[in-house]
Image (cartoon, rainbow, N blue to C red):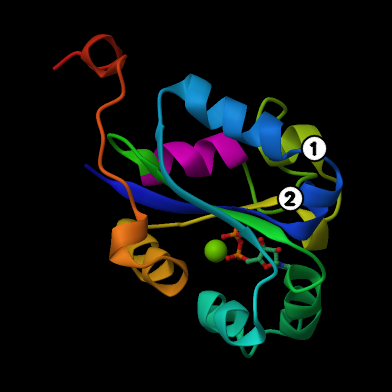
Amino acid sequence: MERSFVMVKPDGVQRGLVGEIVSRLEAKGLKLVAARFEKLPEARVTEQYKEHLSKPFFPGLKTYIMGGPVFLMVWEGRNVVAIVRKVIGATNPQEAMPGTIRGDFGIDIGRNVIHASDSVESAAREIGIHFKADEVCTYTRIDESVLYEY
Ligand code: IDP
Ligand code: MG
């Protein structure tokens, strides 16, 4: 089953959106398989966002992500990576559709509440940055037999 790495960013934590975000992903039918609440060290922030190292917004992004605790999660489900990207919405909250997390809860691109992996490959990489293999749980959710058609 596919997995995605999802993180409520410091602004989402400060604004009390952790529960709302977990609720939306749970209600969609996705399965929470790992979670941790912590302040990220610089090395893991740099590793997480290494594709953006040379971008002009990188220093501000690093300060933002290290500015407070974040809620790290791994979610599992059929096609979960693409589904979560749709649920969170466009990177810029002003362009994100209403009904998406960024569309409903954010305004500035540099304060967009949530991160989610953009491909199956980056999901595997990002999960590996933040979680050990034995921190990701394997279990069956009781509704799986009705959630999926096959
Ligand atoms: P994504 O989070 O939707 O995958 P990316 O392009 O990978 O978007 O950018 C990573 C993060 O960097 C964004 O979520 C946002 O926090 C920040 N970011 C991206 N572009 C800008 C910008 O132009 N100004 C400020 N922050 C930005
Ligand atoms: Mg990205």
Q: Position of residue 97 (x, y in %)?
A: 69, 32
**Secondary structure type for disc 1:** helix
View quadrant of ligand 1 = bottom right
User: How would you rate the neighbour count of disc 1 (Cα within 10 Å): few for under 14, some for 14-19, many for 20 or more?
Assistant: some
Instruction: Check disc 2 and report the residue beneath it.
Output: 113
Q: Quadrant of the C terminus?
A: top left
5 sits to left or right of 79: right
User: How would you rate the neighbour count of disc 2 (Cα within 10 Å): few for under 14, some for 14-19, many for 20 or more?
Assistant: many
| Magenta-colored segment: predominant secondary structure | helix
74 sits to left or right of 3: right
Q: Residue at x 31, y 14 (%)?
A: 143
User: Could you tell me if the residues under marks 1 and 2 are in contact, i.e. CB atoms within 8 Å?
Assistant: yes
Magenta stretch?
81-88
Instruction: Check disc 1 and report the residue beneath it.
Output: 105
Q: Please tell me whether residue 34 is drawn above or below residue 67 in the rendered image.
A: above
Mark 1 residue type: Phe
41 sits to left or right of 61: left
Q: Quadrant of the N terminus?
A: top left
Mark 2 residue type: Val
